[in-house]
Amino acid sequence: MRKIIYSLILTISCLAFSGVYAQETYKIGAAFALSGSIAVYGEGFKKAVDLAVEEINAAGGIKGRKLEIIYEDNKSTPKDCVTAVRKLITVDKVPVIFGPAASSNFMAAAPVAQENKVVMISAEGAAPGLTKAGEYIFRVFPSDVLQGKGISDLCLRLNFKEVPVMYVNNDWGMGLKNVFVENFKKAGGHIMDEIPYDEGKTDYRTELIRAIKGNPKAVVNLTYIKEGAVMFKQAYEMDIKVQWICGSAAKSPKLIELAGKAVEGIIGTYPVFSQETKEYKAFRAAWKRKYGDEKIPIFAEYNYDMVYLTAKAIEKGGYTSDGIRKALIEVAKGYRGVTGDKTFDQDRGVGSEYGVWTIKNGQIVDYKKD
Amino acid sequence: MSSFFLQTIFNGILAGCIYALFAIGLTLIYGVLNFVNFAHGELIMWGAYFLYFLMDRPLNLPLSIAFLPALCLTILLGLGSDRFIFKPLRKASRLTLLITSLGLSFFLRNGAQFFWGAEIRTYGFEIKRGMKLFGVSITPNQLAIIVSSTLCMILLYLFFYKSRMGKSMRAISDDLELARVMGIPSDRAIQFTWIIASFLAGLGGILLALDTNLHPGMGLINLVKAFAATLLGGVGNLWGALLGGMIIGLSENIAVLLLSPGYKDAIAFGIMVMMLLIRSSTIFWPKE
């Protein structure tokens, strides 16, 4: 009998304690790619989120309560993304989740969030249909509808009227490719060949050979960092000399670290925001203080903005998913973050301008036609 | 056009060499111990990471010095996995062994991720343009892949057909019990099998990483193809593994020129299934 009473007391005090603990912080779920094929991105995103959370908490948190991120590894696969999001919803009971990177992974998990009426935000998903799962799904990153046109315009501006297009064979690659091809053909361009390729391979030599059949002057390659690094390296080794044109997903110092001089001179489009604003300068300074370098990983700024917007939405709308959902739209209206204006459109996405980047002497710089 | 084709053939041979190096290790373990070692892919990956470890700070060893110790470490890892995991399970059912090797594969992959993180790494050598030979470009790394896999095949042949240990391994592969009855030291032969399989895995991993990059999933991706090559060549058959690797490497690369490259894997596995269906009438199974 005594044993039972003791254990009851123990259980109750444990429960009470955990209850108190749960009251202490505002928890936000983050289903990030911390392992698997695109973990190279995930680690950078986590750093950016951690930086923003640290700043918000140092400034007193939200109405005195601290923000806490519960990271869940999505292993870079759609299946594990669903598992991770489901775990965050059912076990951790968070009202808002920072969703997985890679559009196909995000889109696999989005219906789960929507069904459970939990807000899910993407800071790097670019597929045109990313938020179509419903009103709980947001993105703080511009859609590829804009970028596809940007790449097409770039090709024509550089006078490349005939190009083959290579792309990663998934939702993101295919979506961007389709928008690009549509715009390019409409503008009078000719697509020489369409070459999809799988993620995560170590050998793309023959795909490259096929791309340069017919001696194109330029090849559009909608690639990620890892695949891009392997491809450009192998293209360099095989002495393939074409102008590579990429999207934004390859724009990273990591690409240069992996592929060295093989990526010298490649160009690509990317959603731009001014690096001269006080918000951006403050972000860069904060990054340097925390991490000791200025190697800001790709899309870190969007993740950083996402945390601030979410914190503002919790503050305004309260710590419930419906509160956050409604407040997000209000707090974002006219909000100027590191990545510029974050006002949501009717599809709960944001707009952007597109710039052109290139790699010169091992540095990513803005492209200027010489 | 013909140089395109030659280059494609060359790419296929290159991929085939890598698949064959992995497939031989897989097939050896299968032949002697009668189970598919799914952790073989992780031996490949750890081989590459051992070299990275020796060449990175704080050791900073040059490639020529770090190469052999990295291979030795891989062999130790292979021997260790046998001593502590597979040896106690020697009498277990094949299914148990299969699941165990799957578990070990996850363990080793996550282990590498724990030490080095999930990001991609390189050894940091400068990239060089390949030499041109009949319109085909070849880099020193690729030459190393082809030369060392050829060398390995020759040495393996000599070992299996000329040396006493090689002959006893073949005997065990044919029939473990009978070999024991005939007084063949099975424990030593099994150890030797692990040494050879791990050596090939380590070598293949290092060559692959030199040619491309390092990441924790690098073994797994190529193991699937190596597994197909093993099946294609007939499990337990050394030459079959080589031939299987070459067939898969060549066919998937040639197919890329003709069909949409999105189907690269489907083609490799389609060929595997087809060959299995017409298995009895092929030349790869001289034993049966």
Image (tube, rainbow, N blue to C red):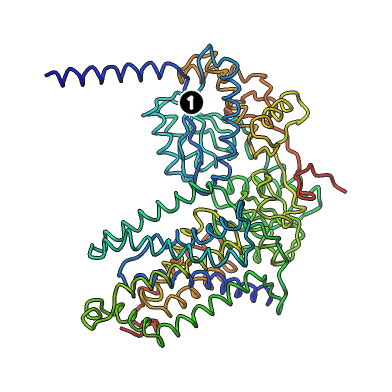
Residue at x 60% of width, y 61% of height: B212
Residue furthest out toward the bottom: B162
Q: Is residue B60 left or right of residue A112?
A: right
Q: Which residue is mark 1?
A: A28
Residue at x 67% of width, y 50% of height: A255
**Residue A235 x, y percent position in the rendering:** 69, 62
Residue furthest out toward the right: A370
Label 1 neighbourhood size at 10 Å, few (<14), some (14-19), many (20+)?
many
Q: Is residue B109 left or right of residue B31?
A: right
**Residue A246 x, y percent position in the rendering:** 69, 49
- Dividing the picture into quarters, in which one does residue A88 lie? top left
Residue furthest out toward the left: A1
Q: Is residue B276 above or below residue A236?
A: below
Q: Quadrant of the C terminus of chain B?
A: bottom left
Given residues B64 and A93, the one toward you in this image is B64
Residue at x 72% of width, y 42% of height: A150
Q: What's under tag 1, amino acid-wise?
A: Ile
